[in-house]
Amino acid sequence: MILATWNVNSIKVRLPQVIRWLMDHKPDVLCIQETKVEDSKFPGDAFAELGYECAFFGQKTYNGVAILSRLPIANVQRNFDGTPDPNQARLIRATIDGKEIINAYVPNGGEPGSDKFQYKLAWLSAFRSYLDSNLSPDMPVLICGDFNVAPEDRDVFDPEVTRGWTLVTDQERSALANVAAWGFTDAFRMHVQDGGQYTWWDYRLLAFRRKWGFRIDHIWITKPLIERCSRSWIDVEPRRAEKPSDHTPLLVELN
């Protein structure tokens, strides 16, 4: 199985790019974030023409997550018990090929110390509680998506310049580490140790050209999937497209 995650930053705007990428790469599963459309307007027919079944959970203008799969999708769950704001479409879970797949769009957080920042920390804490109550690290679980946190200094273009910025504060890293400690392993870091590996570049200040990036999109797996994880990589090409998303796909292969 090849699974990818991609924050498309509006499925309406990026639909031609996503379809072209699916045709070129043919992943078995694609998890997308920031669809930014209500469920009634999700372009499921366009993906069905490519052989993808769709499960989605959206809202107008903001947030929104979806799972596209060539394999049957079962047991779809939208949001999670205990989420701080059930009106925000930030998480979808499904069973695919015997694996529990969780696709998450973690809140950005806004300025450190703001109400939005506290909401982000509360969301991550509530999600950890959900894992404790509903799943086991002994199960084959994969979580992916835009986590809006760069876990380590090697995941940012300049640790000193960005010190204290949203996405890299100690509070955010600690909150995300608490989720990881439930029983997850970073699939990308199993295979790539180098710094300078990014999945998001701000639209502003020519950040992509300057390589001012952050690795904030992730795929994590539990122990039963570790030996089956043969590779993980970032596809930077979609970020070079005309009118791209500010994120680019991250992929993993499970044998």
Image: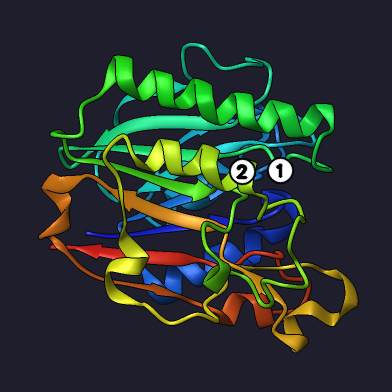
Give the label, 2 or 1, closer to the camera: 2
Q: Which residue appears at 13% of the width and 34% of the height?
A: 138
Q: Image point 76% across, 88% down: which residue?
A: 209
Q: Position of residue 97 (x, y in %)?
A: 17, 42
Tell me which amino acid carries mark 1.
Asn
Q: Disc number at residue 98?
A: none
Gap between marks 2 and 1, in whole Å? 10 Å
- The percent coordinates of residue 227 (x first, y second) are 10, 60
- Point out the image quarter for the N terminus: bottom left
230 lies left or right of 191? left
Q: Secondary structure at mark 2?
A: helix
Q: Earlier in the sequence, mark 2 or mark 1?
A: 1
Q: Nearer the viewer, residue 206 or 19?
A: 206
Residue 32: x %, y % from top left: 53, 49
Residue 97 to residue 203: above or below: above
Task: Determine which residue is flagged by label 2.
Answer: 172
User: Callout 2, which amino acid?
Assistant: Glu
Residue beneath the point at 54% across and 31% down: 124
Q: What quarter of the picture does the C terminus occupy?
A: bottom left
The disc at residue 108 is 1
Quadrant housing residue 155: bottom right
Q: Secondary structure at mark 1?
A: loop
